[in-house]
Amino acid sequence: MTKQLFNFPSLETLSIAAADRLVSLANESIKARGVFRIALAGGSTPRHLYEIISSGTYRTQTDWSAWAVYFGDERIVPLTDNRSNYAMAEESLLTHVPISKGNIHPAPVSLGGGRSVAEEYECIIRDTTRSQSQVPQFDLILLGLGSDGHTASLFPGKPALQETQRLVVESTPGALPPPVDRVTFTLPLLNAARQIFFLATGRDKADAFRAAYEGVPLGDVEQVPAHLVHPDDGDVAWFVTKELAAEV
Ligand code: 6PG
């Protein structure tokens, strides 16, 4: 694994740099394997990145028909709810680009219970990536960071973080809002990726970033979820704003 740190003066410059790398990676993946499998992140930080790649010249720089889109975590609310990660991605990205509906794979939240949603989402991921016996390798997984060190919906001290077999599991809410049940990619699936991008901004995440990047405890939390993301055969790139990078 290689780990790179890129730091920027603002969310705008961070998002443009991430957009450049994302589109290059998409095109390399399509050239090499005919498909670009990406798992999107939720939260608010990636919204601007999604807006950038789906507008202006970026929109014309990739073959959207070769994209296959998934979600690294999802809140169990209707896909039209404003707390839904899918809803945010749909509004800022998916409605603006010609990705066919059949290549967009949201978590099946209408099943209701976290366990059923997680099990069915794992089946969808295995079927659509044709990975029945091995762990599928995403070309890119986008992730965020919480001030408690969580990433995707892997929260400190919760069972989802310990999962070693399943690819997607249910996850009860952490300390940060919104307080809704979720499903999340597990560490085995995250750590099979070819490339991870973490996007993080905001002074309130400075301690979490240091803990995630350097592997030091965060208060009394020894196992910082974001620090446990280190793909076996993949790379990690951190895109952060300057108030975070000053911490390492
Ligand atoms: C979610 C997430 C979560 C998010 C971080 C950062 O569903 O809440 O996917 O892991 O990425 O909490 O969120 P912000 O970008 O809003 O700070």
Image (cartoon, grey):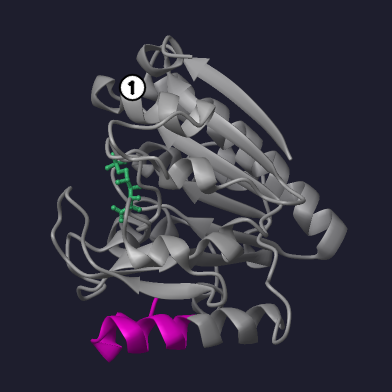
How many marks the image carries: the answer is 1
Near mark 1 (Cα within 10 A), the count class, few <14, some 14-19 or many ≥20, is many
Q: Where is residue 74 in the image (x, y as percent from the top left)?
A: 33, 66
- Which residue shows up at 59% across the image and 64% down it? 188
> Which is more toward the observer, 168 or 93?
168
When the figure is inspected, residue 25 is found, relative to residue 37, above or below; the finding is above
Find residue 244 and report its image quarter. top left
> Which is more toward the observer, 93 or 209?
209
When the figure is inspected, residue 232 is found, relative to residue 35, above or below; the finding is above
Which residue is disc 1 drawn over? 206
Q: Where is residue 76 in the image (x, y as percent from the top left)?
A: 24, 73
Q: Position of residue 227 (x, y in %)?
A: 50, 40
Q: Main secondary structure of the magenta part?
A: helix
Find residue 204 and report its image quarter. top left
- Which residue shows up at 24% across the image and 67% down it? 172
Find residue 112 and report its image quarter. bottom left
Name the quadrant of the N terminus.
top right
| Residue stretch in magenta | 107-121
